Image: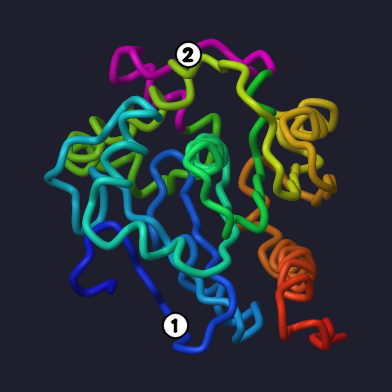
C-alpha cells in the first residue's frame, strides 16, 4: 500500500495483524517520525503512518490548512478507508492529535465500530484555550524565529534559505490547522482515550492534557513523560514502552487475543 497510496506508509507490513495503529504527525512532520515504531510494538499491530499533502513524496501538493477539509480529502482518497476494515487505534502528536481526534469523531458519527482507542500526545485538549498567539501569518523571519524557539525543526533546515522557501507553505499550513481550529461540541467519544504530556513542555500543562478526559465517555489515562514538546523523540524508548503497554491493553480486549502478555 505504501508504494501505491500517497496517503499511507507502512514500514513493516504485518499480514496477520489484529490491530492497525494509524499515526498522524506533528506540524512539519512526516511519516519518517514513525519509521522505528514497529521495532517497539508487538507484531500483532501494523503501524500505518499518514502522509499529509505538502511533504515528503507529496511536497509539490499544497498543504491543507483546515482540519475538516483535510479529513474530507483523506477519507475520499482511494484505499484510505481500508485502514478501518479491522480494529484500529488512532494516534497523533500535537497537530496530529487534533487530526486524530476530529477523525475519530467523524468515524463515530458514521457508525464505524472498529475504533478501539484514541492516543494523543503533546497537545492541549481541543476545548481548551490555545497555549500561545497564532504564528502562521507572521513575516518569514519572525515565523522562522518562532519555529526555532518551539524546537523540533533541525537547525540545518532553519539555516537553509532555499529549503525553508520550499517548505514554508507546508509549515504555515500545518500551523493553520491548529491555530484556526474552533472546537464544536458533539457527542463524546465512546472509545478509550490515552493522553501523553511532556513534563517540561511549554505548549501544555498537566491540567490541559488531562482535560482530554472531558471529550470521551470511555476509559481515560494520563501519562506524563520527561521532556519538552518533542518528548516522543527525546524520550522515544520510554514513550514507546508506555505506548506498547496501552496497545497491549487494546489487543487484549479483542476476540482471540486475551492471552497476550506485555513483555518485561
Q: Is residue 237 above or below residue 224?
A: below
Task: Return the disc, 1 or 2, that comes first in the chain's sequence.
Answer: 1
In the picture as drawn, the residue positioned furthest to the left comes out as: 60
Residue stretch rendered in magenta on the structure: 128-147
**Toward the viewer: 232 or 184?**
184
Q: Residue 53 lies in magenta, yes or no?
A: no
Q: Which residue is mark 1?
A: 12
What x and y, as percent, mark residue 250?
A: 73, 67
The residue depicted at 28 percent of the width and 57 percent of the height is: 7
For label 1, count other residues whose C-alpha is less than 10 Å away and answer few (under 14), some (14-19) or many (20+).
some
The kind of secondary structure the magenta stretch mainly shows is loop
Q: Which mark is residue 31?
A: none
**Toward the viewer: 164 or 255?**
255
Number of numbered callouts drawn:
2
What x and y, as percent, mark residue 88?
A: 56, 63
What x and y, as percent, mark residue 251?
A: 71, 74
Q: Which residue is mark 2?
A: 134
Amino acid at each position: 500500500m505504501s508504494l501505491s497510496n500517497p496517503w499511507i506508509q507502512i514500514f513493516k507490513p504485518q499480514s496477520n495483524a489484529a490491530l492497525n495503529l494509524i499515526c498522524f504527525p506533528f506540524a512539519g512532520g512526516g511519516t519518517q517520525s514513525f519509521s522505528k515504531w514497529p521495532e517497539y510494538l508487538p507484531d500483532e499491530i501494523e503501524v500505518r503512518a499518514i502522509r499529509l499533502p505538502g511533504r515528503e513524496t507529496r511536497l509539490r501538493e499544497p498543504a491543507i490548512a483546515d482540519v475538516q477539509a483535510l479529513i474530507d480529502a483523506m477519507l475520499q482518497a482511494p484505499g484510505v478507508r481500508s485502514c478501518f476494515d479491522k480494529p484500529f487505534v488512532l494516534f497523533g502528536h500535537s497537530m496530529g492529535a487534533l487530526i486524530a481526534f476530529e477523525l475519530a469523531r467523524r468515524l463515530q458519527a458514521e457508525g464505524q465500530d472498529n475504533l478501539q482507542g484514541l492516543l494523543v500526545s503533546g497537545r492541549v485538549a481541543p476545548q481548551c484555550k490555545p497555549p500561545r498567539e497564532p504564528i502562521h501569518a507572521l513575516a518569514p523571519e519572525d515565523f522562522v524565529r518562532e519555529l526555532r524557539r518551539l524546537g523540533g525543526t533541525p537547525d540545518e533546515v532553519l539555516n537553509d534559505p532555499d529549503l525553508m522557501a520550499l517548505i514554508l507553505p507546508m509549515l504555515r499550513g500545518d500551523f493553520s490547522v491548529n491555530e484556526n481550529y474552533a472546537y464544536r461540541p458533539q457527542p463524546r467519544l465512546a472509545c478509550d482515550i490515552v493522553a501523553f504530556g511532556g513534563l517540561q513542555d511549554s505548549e501544555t500543562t498537566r491540567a490541559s492534557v488531562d482535560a482530554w478526559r472531558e471529550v470521551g465517555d470511555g476509559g481515560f489515562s494520563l501519562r506524563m513523560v520527561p521532556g519538552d514538546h518533542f518528548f516522543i523523540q527525546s524520550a522515544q524508548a520510554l514513550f514507546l514502552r508506555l505506548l506498547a503497554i496501552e496497545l497491549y491493553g487494546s489487543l487484549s480486549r479483542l476476540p482471540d487475543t486475551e492471552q497476550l502478555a506485555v513483555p518485561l
